[in-house]
Image (cartoon, helix red, strand yellow):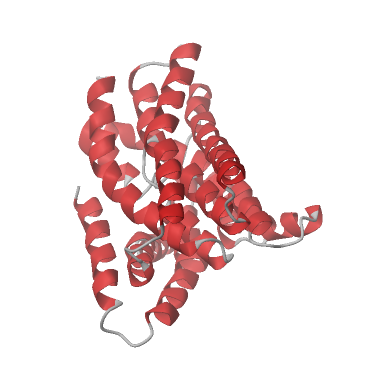
Amino acid sequence: MTGVALLVACLALGVVAARVIRDPQRLARAISWWVLRIALPALVLTLLPRLTFERELWFLVAAMWLVFAGGWAVAAMGGAYFGWSRARIGAVALTAGLGNTAFTGYPLIEALHGPQALPLAAVADQLGCFIALSTGGVIIASWYGGERARAGALIRRIVLFPPFLACIAGFIAGQLGGWPAWFDQVLRIVGATLSPLALLAIGLQLRWRISATQLQAVGLGLGWKLMAAPLLVWLLGIAIGTQGLLLTVGVLQAAMGPMVSATLLAEERNLDAAVGHAMLAIGVLASLASVPLIDFYLR
């Protein structure tokens, strides 16, 4: 659980730093650039070549895509009903549909079920949640961020998204036997900066006072992400006969709080940053209690 404690500490440090430095927004933008374009691709490049995929593991990938599609649907329906702006719908869709399946998912699942559960958690994260971010997440961010919805432009956005390029390179490296040891070590060091720096950037911009309509969006998004999504994944698993650790990891990964990188992507594309930051901060902290509780009931 040391990794989770580090995330909370970095978020708190960002909140404190925002009160003492001159231009916290500028620093946050610089950190976000590093996270999305350097640290996240490095992490993908070191994790993907190690993954092995067996037929029954498709449930984990399908579960993450179900959470993503459901989060988008909840945001779209909520936005239509409550009259939200496109920027707010996009922010909720990204943060409600994409979970922090790596930097809270890995330590929580290892703490609850031991190291034997980590390969399953990695499949859900890298082949499920991350691919959803690199493709569907980019589409949502571009669509609701005000860009013209031309297929060619959206495809270019996806193909030129640095983590997507890293994904392709990681698959190729895996087929060729992986990276040289020295290069893999460099990737690990760079990738390890992702989550602490991302939470620091969020803390620098976090606003604790949000309007009632923003709080309404946060409540609806987290209601899906922390409660309804894991329930739906559990029902899917039961319906198709999935059981044991495979079912448990799928449900727990579905229950993780919002993804850090999705929040930064929402901010970069001028979506509702206040809602995205609140979703992340509240969701990550709440998931530290809700995920063990869900695991208790699954047992």
Up the image or down, 104 lies above or below 252; here it is below
Coordinates of residue 190 in the picture (x, y in percent) = 39, 66
Q: Position of residue 36 (x, y in %)?
A: 50, 64
Farthest residue, direction bottom: 22
Which residue does the image show at 24% across and 19% down from the upper left? 299
Of residues 188 and 207, the one nearer the viewer is 207
- 52 or 199: nearer the viewer: 199
Residue pictured at 44% horizontal, 42% vertical:
220
Q: Is residue 285 left or right of residue 98?
A: left
Q: Quick check: 202 left or right of 213?
A: left
Residue depicted at x 42% and y 78%: 25
Q: Going by the image, does 98 lie left or right of 209?
A: right
Report how many numbered discs are placed on residues in the image.
0
Is residue 215 positioned above or below 209 on the image?
A: above
Q: Is 67 in front, or is 48?
A: 67
237 vs 32: above or below: above
Please name whichever residue, 78 or 121, is drawn nearer the observer in this view of the structure. Answer: 78
Give coordinates of residue 186: x percent, y percent: 40, 65
| Residue 168 visible in the displayed image | no
Asked which quadrant contains residue 10, the reply is: bottom left
On the question of residue 138 being in view, the answer is yes
